[in-house]
Amino acid sequence: MLNGVIMSEDRVVAKVRRNNCIVFDPNHCPLYLMRYNDPEGWLTRRAIDAHRTNSRLLRKALRLAPNDDLAAVLRVHGATITDAYWFRGENENLTYDQVKFQKDNPFSRLALRGDPDSFQKGTAASVTPELTNTGSYEKCWEYHDGAWWMLKSGSDLEKFSELFVYHLGRLMGLPMAHYEMDQEGYIRSKDFTEGWYDFEPAYSVMLDEEDYGENYRRFRELCPKAAQQYVGMVYLDALVMNMDRHTNNYGFLRDRQTGKILSLAPLFDHNIALVSRGYPSSATQKGGLLCRLFVELLEEEPQAKRDFLALGLTPPTEEMVRRAVSLANNPPFGPEVVREDFLMEFVLSADRWITGGLNL
């Protein structure tokens, strides 16, 4: 049974007694605990995905059982890079400075690519932010140029798709997490919390509920600005056929000092969008699933339509798509990965169908 306290930096926000949570500071308490009172579930969901090959290697190197998510998380007191929450056991006397991750991460390359030299460094006392680096792809955190960066592996089609969507969304005026290629050919993304904000995944308030209307209505209750930005997110998802949007790869930014929900987090995780799984048989999107779901949202929620128009996004154009292709294809991937004419029709046909369906 868990016994201790949930912390936000050096604030005690909740007491945990036999896995029951008593909230002291609702302004700084994780949203999931405010809603569901499940501290063990909250902690285990912060664990590295046990199904990743390199996760198994990392756990073995650190003398952790392969499927004991709670033990893996408690090794680092539940701390992560993207928020200031952590767990302090009842017999511990620790501060946040002692718990938060330092700039050195000796197991980054073990998590990213199964590096044997990193494997040899493991001990039963080793700590690393990789133990709370969630998601199904092989990835790692590294500190460069005054910031944490997440490096992620993938195929050339996945890397190009991630970069293209980043540039397209940015050119349209959407808040996007920054992506770029590093010198080794990995795609990397800068930590958008920057030590000032806490990222709260949508799972914290929605669990696995992905219905657009349910999400939109709940977001409006919590933060109208985030709800408006959510509409922009699902619009972009429709344009680029982002098949893998789920409640752990979007969410909120909270002010770390006040706890206030400020906005939707910058958009990230588009490596299963666009052409990441290969080029579809047709470049023309004629009322595909995500386009239909977006139109249905705006038809069923009049406020969502008003929010969409109020965003003032720049609609995709031929020039914009060419620019996004050019930026994403630097350094070049090759003609089998980048087919500009296909991508042009793919994005613009989706936008034509959406605007036609909504009479915009």
Image (cartoon, rainbow, N blue to C red):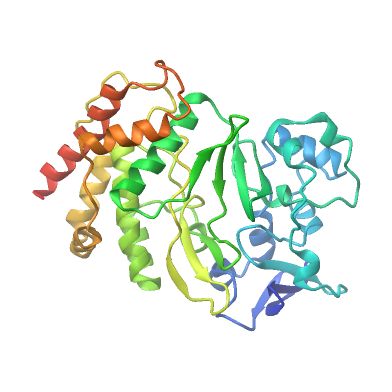
Q: Residue at x 70, y 72 (%)?
A: 6
Q: Is residue 287 visible?
A: no
Q: Quadrant of the N terminus?
A: bottom right
Q: Position of residue 2 (x, y in %)?
A: 77, 67
The total number of labels drawn is: 0
Res 214 → quadrant: bottom left
Residue 116 lies left or right of residue 189; in this view the side is right
Q: Position of residue 283 (x, y in %)?
A: 25, 24
From where the camera sits, is residue 83 visible? yes
- Is 356 situated above or below 102? above
Quadrant of the image occupied by residue 311: bottom left
Residue 79 on image: x %, y %: 71, 61
* Residue at the spot 64% in from the left edge and 36% down from the top edge: 138
Report the residue at 53% width, 76% height from top. Answer: 259
Residue 188 horizontal side relative to residue 4, left or right: left
* Residue 105 coordinates in the image, percent (x, y): 76, 48
Q: Is residue 206 left or right of residue 351?
A: right
| Depth check, front residue: 291 or 140 | 140
Q: Residue furthest top?
A: 336
Q: Which residue lies at the image location 39% right of the left edge and 27% below the top edge?
A: 275
Nearer to us in this view, 204 or 255: 255
Q: Can you say whether 269 is above or below 84 in the image?
A: above
Q: What is the residue that sits farthest to the left in this orientation?
A: 359
